[in-house]
Amino acid sequence: MKTQQDLHVATPVRESLALTKLAGTSIYLKLDSSQPTGSFKIRGLGHLCKTAKRGYERFVCCSGGNAGMAAAYSARKLGVPATIIVPNVTPNITVEKMRDEGATVIIHGKVSIAYGQELVLAFVYKGKATHLWRSSKELEHDLKEKPGAIVLSVGGGGLLNGVVEGLRRANWADVPVVAMETMGAHSLHAAMEAGEHVTLPAITSVATTLGVAKVSAQTMKLSQEHPILSEVVTDQEAVKAVERFVDDEKILVEPACGAALAAVYSGIITRLRDERKLPQHLGPVVIVVCGGNNISLEQLDKCILTVC
């Protein structure tokens, strides 16, 4: 393996005047969209690949999205071949990006973890492995005061798990997390409503990278230990948030990230304050802009047509 350095970079945190004006409270953006792979996934997957305990001949990852891109990038930087297995709905632009990283890309209907394990020499799974839950001290370093809340999108829950771990390490364990999902990919919300781990019967949201039918066991555990406010928006709200964010911040992100941005654009932060679920005098609210690779202007147009 060629490098001992982290494969992710420290991403900026900056205030958004446009979102602050809408929310009526200070909004900061944690721009993990500026990672080398375009999303936060490189944090955990890069660490997993780099700290492998034995020399692997090849990395194999089943993902048509950001985990696959992170695995392909990590493999190239570490000098290890990679095979990425993607579903046939993966946008061509994403497949080409993975191939540009030097990965072998196999299009295999619906993504099958079992099929990936048939090929395995080192199987990189984006889901439940605890070693993927890596947080950083960047928020603690960049913010001059304790945050009032953290807003993030939830798929399988790895990002939420890492953020909560980071809050605890910073002695900010009382900082609430606003967990945003889209209807049709709302596995955490369904579990919290039921009071137990549940599995969605199907994923129907256009926010495909949130499409995990059952959140991790660790996420379910944290939902009972940490102040987590679960909120669900429609696909239309998530896509509209992506459009407005391009206008306001000149950054293009996936609908999965649009779910987090909709916390402001759809008035959820304001409502939570009105309902006293968040304090009226709120410290800076940090939105984790998780980014995403399955997006382009063409893909955004298709999403708009789909949800209209």
Image (cartoon, rainbow, N blue to C red):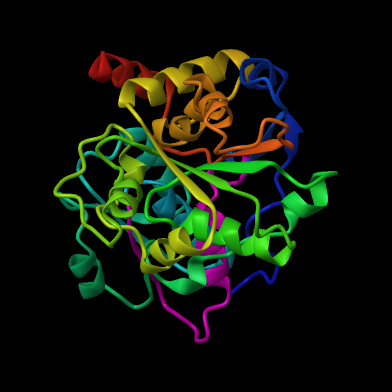
Is 54 magenta? The answer is yes
The residue at 34%/46% (across/down) is: 189
**Quadrant of the rendering where the N terminus is positioned:** bottom right
Q: Where is residue 291 in the image (x, y as percent from the top left)?
A: 52, 38
> Left or right: where does residue 34 sit relative to residue 180?
right
Q: Residue furthest right?
A: 144
> Left or right: where does residue 60 sit relative to residue 160?
left
The residue at 29%/75% (across/down) is: 120
Q: In this view, does 249 lie above or below 13?
A: above
Q: In this view, does 229 lie above or below 207?
A: below
The residue at 35%/51% (across/down) is: 188
Q: Where is residue 58 in the image (x, y as percent from the top left)?
A: 40, 72
> Left or right: where does residue 218 sit relative to residue 291?
left
Q: Where is residue 28 in the image (x, y as percent from the top left)?
A: 70, 33
Which one is nearer the viewer's eye here, 76 or 273?
273
Q: Position of residue 170 (x, y in %)?
A: 74, 61
The residue at 55%/38% (across/down) is: 277
**Quadrant of the rendering where the C terminus is positioned:** top left
Which one is nearer the viewer's eye here, 257 or 299?
257
Is 2 magenta? The answer is no
Q: Is residue 252 above or below residue 13?
A: above
Residue 82 in which image quadrant: bottom left
Q: Residue furthest front?
A: 276
Disc tally is 0
Boundaries of the magenta span: 34-63
